[in-house]
Amino acid sequence: MNELASTNDYAKKYALELAADAGRITVITARHQTKGRGQQGNAWESEDGKNLLFSILCHPLYIRADAQYVLSAAIALSTCTTIKEMLGTAYADHIRIKWPNDIYYKDKKMAGILIENDLIGSTIQNSIIGVGIDVNQAIFVSDAPNPISMVNISGTEYNCTDLLNSIITKFATMLEALQNNTKDYTEHIFQEYMNTLFRNDGNSYRFKDAAGDFTARITAVDRTGRITLTDTSGSQRRYEFKEVSFIL
């Protein structure tokens, strides 16, 4: 579509018309969003026609509600891997998943993911996964602190349809594998996620929580999405999203 308020909001309305079919994936794209959203209601800036904005509607009935973070890891990996492939080896080592599921190039954000799940009992009936990737936008005018696009990095413009198709293919393959072998493939996804995680290199970095700044290294991300940080005193600190932030 040329313009939507939000692809995730449109997907929510569409989900009401569909029976939950574990094998179906619906993709909704827009050239421009007038009310694009990030995590916790943050706005998403995107110049008309320059970036990739889409939502995936899927029905992973085979994933338990208490293990739903595997969807976040899967779409983050699909997105990160595709961006690496398109930018090429000269830039790939600097492209990482920043917990919980942003895509970063060095210390700058190039993609964000927003996931909204509808639960029925212990399973996921509908999962709406919104993805925004800065592709060909060269100038950013909002107060977002650290945006960067693919064209900013390489100086080359990219075909957003090719980018979308690659992400969807990778993600669909992961969903199929999860459906066929949920436990083992979940562990595979999380291992790849940890290997790709921003600042998960054994070194200590600065973070901030409600008590103030501290220095720690990333130790783990559990299956519910909580991050564990080990500070310089050896104490382990566990956080939900928005309870701790990176100091860049």
Image: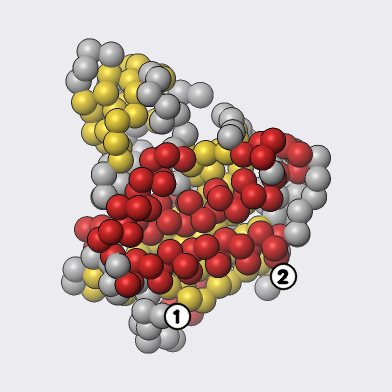
Q: Which mark is residue 81?
A: none
Locate residue 10, reporting x and y percent: 53, 72
Q: Residue at x 57, y 61 (%)?
A: 167
Query: Which circle's residue, 2 or 1, is located before the other in the chain?
Result: 2
Confirm whether residue 50 shows in the render.
yes
Quadrant location, the N terminus? bottom right
Q: Please state if 25 lies on the left or on the right of 59 as rendered.
A: right
Q: Which residue is under mark 1?
A: 24
Left or right position of 177 against 2: left
Amino acid under disc 2: Asn
State left or right for residue 7 relative to residue 162: left
Say above or below: 177 vs 50. below
Looking at the rendering, which quadrant does residue 19 occupy? bottom left
Vertical position of residue 218 compared to residue 142: above or below:
above
| Other-residue count near label 1 (Cα within 10 Å), few / some / many at <14 / 14–19 / ≥20 | few
Q: Secondary structure at mark 1?
A: loop
Distance Cα–Cα, label 2 vs label 1: 24 Å
Task: Where is residue 232? Give x, y as percent.
Answer: 28, 13
Which residue in the protein does label 2 denote?
2
